[in-house]
Image (cartoon, rainbow, N blue to C red):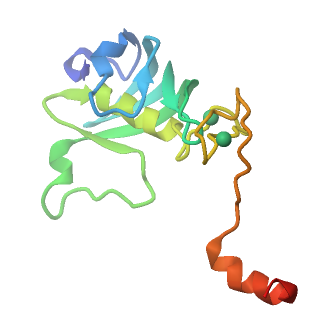
């Protein structure tokens, strides 16, 4: 999954690629790619650097952090990354990249790693705490049923033991 830069002969070129999920999947991913990954971008060549701007589209399957069910997350992520030759990232006195210029990548061997670009977009798209839906009710902490689809007769006590002394102060009759 590389973009061969020797094939980029003009100042601006449009590239369309479609990759099957297997081409991108890694065993330790915490998502599953369930649709082909569409990449559509423009490449702007300027001197030694290349600006790559476009979108990555697919659908990922994630695990809800509350109820542990799988759910699908459509991804349509825009990116705009400036790729510099890897040598510019080495040594002193070379071109320094400003901190605020976040979307900078490096390439070597005249090729850009599109797989890495796509995976970065996935990580940007995936929330810190993935939820199957905003109001997911999660699992019963007592019996473990999925409260989105089932009910149970447990009455979980949500009291925080650290608050018990406080409660005793509020309700002195409990002593
Ligand atoms: Zn859920
Ligand atoms: Zn229960």
**Residue at the spot 62% in from the left edge and 78% down from the top edge:** 162
- The reply, left or right, for residue 68 in relation to residue 99 is right
Q: Is residue 39 above or below residue 135?
A: above
Q: Residue at x 63, y 33 (%)?
A: 146
Q: Quadrant of residue 166?
A: bottom right
Vertical placement of 97 versus 110: above or below? Answer: below
Q: Position of residue 2 (x, y in %)?
A: 24, 21
Q: Is residue 55 at all visible to an observer of this figure?
A: no
Ligand 1's quadrant is top right
Q: Nearer the viewer, residue 77 or 169?
A: 169
User: x%, y% of residue 14?
Assistant: 43, 15
| Residue under the point 47% across and 12% down | 35
Q: Quadrant of the C terminus?
A: bottom right
Task: Kindly indicate the quadrant of the structure image that contains residue 13.
Answer: top left
Q: Quadrant of residue 85 in the image?
A: top left
| Viewer-side residue, 54 vs 164 | 164
Q: Where is residue 118 drawn, in percent x and y? A: 38, 28
Q: Residue at x 30, y 26 (%)?
A: 115
């Amino acid at each position: 999954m590389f973009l061969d830069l020797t094939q980029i002969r003009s100042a601006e070129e449009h590239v369309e690629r479609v990759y099957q999920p297997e081409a991108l999947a890694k065993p330790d991913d915490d998502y599953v790619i369930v649709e082909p990954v569409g990449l559509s971008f423009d490449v702007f060549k300027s001197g030694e650097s290349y600006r790559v701007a476009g979108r990555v589209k697919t659908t990922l399957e994630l695990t809800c952090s509350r109820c542990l069910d799988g759910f699908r997350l459509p991804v349509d992520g825009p990116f705009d990354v400036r790729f510099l030759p890897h040598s510019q990232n080495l040594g002193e006195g070379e071109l320094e990249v400003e901190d605020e210029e976040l979307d900078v990548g490096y390439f070597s061997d005249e090729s850009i790693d599109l797989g890495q670009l796509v995976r970065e977009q996935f990580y940007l798209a995936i929330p810190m705490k993935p939820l199957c839906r905003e109001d997911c009710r999660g699992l019963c902490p007592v019996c473990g049923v999925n409260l989105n689809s089932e009910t149970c007769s447990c009455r979980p006590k949500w009291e925080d033991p650290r608050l018990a002394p406080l409660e005793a102060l509020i309700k002195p009759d409990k002593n």
